[in-house]
């Protein structure tokens, strides 16, 4: 399950570098690994982003989305808009709109925050491993691209499954809601006892 505990992608990348034996290598494609991890997270799915807002200047009906946008949610005034690549198209020709959108929360160094979960860490490790094997840059040459890809698919499914499992707090809230909306069994017996006897009376004609 994905909890509210988040960790920096820098921490995950450090663990990946150690596990893949990249420590001490002169050229570690860190920027590439960040992009691979972002892609991996998009494949895993789940809503572990933060919601924020930003003002967008509109010129000739068009504005540009914030650079950290993951998913547009709505405009503050609830007017309609159209997404076209990195542009937003609105009904007003000029002016300013306020967009509510999803983005990665980031740490003090600007690294995205992701769920602090072993399944996520393993999935992202094998995602990076898959691309490093494809480039021939893995220290362990016995790990093939095909094997790394198989492991990525497996851990990606596992991490994705966690995004759909409620946390203990969510389960408690669900239980509380169900308890409130489902009548007590004893009350059901009281409510329907007369109906039961009326149906029985009509059935047998007594």
Image (tube, helix red, strand yellow):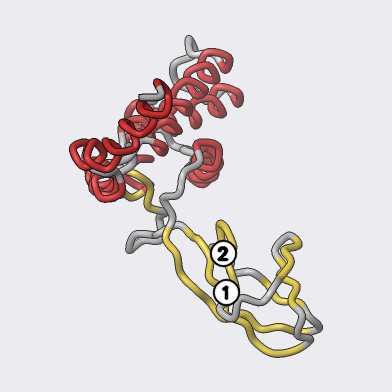
Along the polypeptide, which appears first: circle 2 or circle 1? 2
> Picture quarter containing residue 135?
top right
Question: In this figure, which residue is indicated by the disc labeled 1?
Answer: 99
Task: Let me know if residue 5 appears in the view.
Answer: no
Which residue lies most toward the left here? 186
Could you tell me if the residues under marks 2 and 1 are in contact, i.e. CB atoms within 8 Å? Answer: yes
Location of the N terminus (image quadrant): top left
Left or right for 144, reference 197? right
Within 10 angstroms of label 2, few (less than 14), some, or many (20 or more) residues? some
Q: Nearer the viewer, residue 172 or 96?
A: 172
* Secondary structure state at the residue bearing disc 2: strand
Left or right for 196, reference 190? right
Q: Indicate the position of residue 81 as horizontal and vertical percent values.
A: 71, 70
Task: Tell me the residue at 29%/38% (across/down).
Answer: 194
> Picture quarter containing residue 133?
top right
Task: Tell me the residue at 76%/77% (across/down).
Answer: 62
Q: Is residue 26 above or below residue 100?
A: above
Q: Indicate the position of residue 84 as horizontal and vertical percent values.
A: 76, 62
Left or right for 56, reference 116? right
> Picture quarter containing residue 86?
bottom right
Question: In this figure, which residue is indicated by the disc labeled 2?
Answer: 73
Q: CA distance from mark 2 to mark 1?
A: 7 Å
Q: Is residue 108 above or below residue 31?
A: below
Q: Indicate the position of residue 159 as horizontal and vertical percent values.
A: 41, 32
Task: Tell me the residue at 40%/59% (across/down).
Answer: 105
């Amino acid at each position: 399950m994905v909890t509210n505990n988040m960790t920096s992608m820098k921490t995950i990348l450090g663990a990946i570098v150690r596990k893949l034996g990249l420590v001490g290598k002169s050229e570690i494609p860190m920027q590439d690994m960040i992009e691979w991890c972002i892609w991996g997270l998009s494949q895993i799915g789940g809503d572990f982003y933060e919601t924020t807002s930003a003002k967008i200047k509109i010129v000739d009906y068009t504005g540009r989305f914030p650079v950290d946008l993951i998913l547009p949610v709505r405009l503050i005034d609830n007017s309609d808009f159209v997404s076209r690549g990195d542009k937003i198209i609105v009904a007003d020709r000029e002016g300013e709109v306020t967009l509510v959108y999803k983005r990665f929360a980031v740490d003090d160094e600007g690294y995205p925050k992701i769920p602090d979960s072993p399944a996520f860490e393993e999935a992202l490790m094998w995602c990076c491993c898959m691309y490093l094997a494809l480039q021939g840059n893995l220290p362990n040459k016995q790990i093939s691209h095909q094997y790394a890809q198989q492991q990525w698919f497996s851990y990606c499914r596992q991490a994705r499954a966690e995004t759909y499992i409620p946390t203990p707090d969510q389960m408690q809230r669900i239980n509380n809601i169900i308890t409130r909306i489902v009548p007590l069994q004893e009350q059901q017996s009281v409510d329907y006892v007369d109906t039961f006897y009326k149906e029985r009376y009509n059935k047998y004609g007594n």
